[in-house]
Amino acid sequence: MSPARTFASDNNSGAHPAVLAAIAAANTGHMHAYGDDPYTEHAVEVLRGHLGAQADVFFVFNGTGANVVCLSALLKPYQAVICPATAHIATDECGAPERFTGSKLIGVPTADGKLRPADITAQLGGMGVEHHVQPRVVSISQVTELGTIYTCEEIRALADAAHSAGLLLHMDGARLANAAAALDVPIRAMTTDAGVDALSFGGTKNGMLFGEAACFLTPGLVSDGKYVRKNAGQLPSKMRFVAAQFSALYEGELWHELASHANAMAERLADGAAAVSGVEIVQVRGANEVFARLPREHVAAMREVADFYEWDGSPGVVRWVASFDTTEQDVDGFLAVMRGLPGV
């Protein structure tokens, strides 16, 4: 099978060699299962280096699992989550958050995938009324599902609005590294220091084989996280192999290097596509995703070159995603075909 690269998703990429080497290094002898091992202990400290010593870190299998664990620990069944209508928890997790929490998701329509403080306030009219679901958590994605990014100041404003209403702020950080690299800030600056209470800490999209982490950043917020994780089916028995990957990626600057590269390849793609007649960039590119509108007759032709997704049934709107291993040649070859399409 010949190797191929696509622009469909950063989940389509492989694992970085340093991550695979870390897994192999952890594959020595027998160790206690379920996280009672030195690899897990070390990886927890590595992530605390990015989030603060107060952070409680629970490794899980995947992003949906991290979201389910975070939200399950924060919610009761009569409570609700305020999120953008486009949020991953609302559109691409097959109802798992509702199933495991028993809680309602309140999807707020937004043009760019980002909530504003006023969006929170608008959902509080039923607070204290027993007939109405009670908002408890505000959930945002960093990077958003439309490829945009919250600044640290915007996150702080959302946290302040949520906390003043007695709500908590959760961040789905599947592309957390890409956002931090794009903003050129430490991870802590847009999470703990910006008032985020719970974080789904991503790794898979940035070079890991599998694995994410459910993190609780506010001291004393959650006392039963390990039970919530187990109950949700997200407790890896051989946790050292998840933990070793996080250490390889986040102990030094590898995470930043890989995310910065993916962002740069997306910028190259967006700039090149914007210069092609008939192509329109429809969202501000924040990190490693590009949303564009093409003439419908060109979409199929471009998908013959490299696979990508049409977006939500919108005529001609597509999403291109660059990965840590996307090359300049991948981008330039794709653009060359685009420029050569009839009528362009």
Image (cartoon, rainbow, N blue to C red):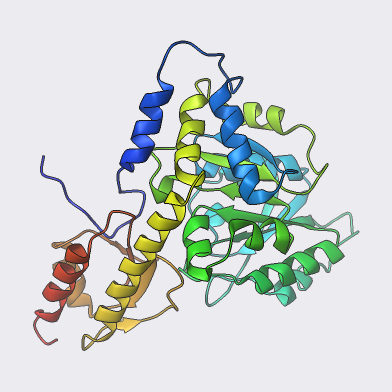
User: Which x, y percent locates residue 275?
Assistant: 24, 86
Residue 123 is left or right of residue 320, and the answer is right
**Left/right of residue 312 with respect to residue 219 in the rendered view:** left
Above or below, 151 against 71 in this view is below
Would you say residue 84 is visible in this rendering? yes
Which residue sits at x=22%, y=76%?
A: 296
Q: As drawn, which residue projects farthest toward the top?
A: 30
Badge count: 0
Above or below — where is 112 with respect to 81?
below
> Where is residue 264 drawn, in percent x and y?
35, 68
Horizontal side, residue 86 vs residue 205: left or right: right
- Decide which of 296, 162 is in the foreground and name it: 162
Look at 42% across and 37% down and name the residue there. Answer: 210
Work out which quarter of the rendered image holds the N terminus and state it: top left
176 w.r.t. 31: above or below: below
Q: Is residue 78 left or right of residue 311?
A: right
Residue 286 image point, x, y percent: 46, 72
Residue 256: quarter of image: bottom left
User: In the rendered image, is residue 314 in sight?
Assistant: no
Q: Residue at x 30, y 43 (%)?
A: 14
Between 209 and 64, the residue placed more toward the observer is: 209
The quadrant in which residue 257 appears is: bottom left
The image shows residue 327 at horizontal and vertical percentages of: 23, 61
Figure quadrant of the C terminus: bottom left
Q: Quadrant of residue 32?
A: top right
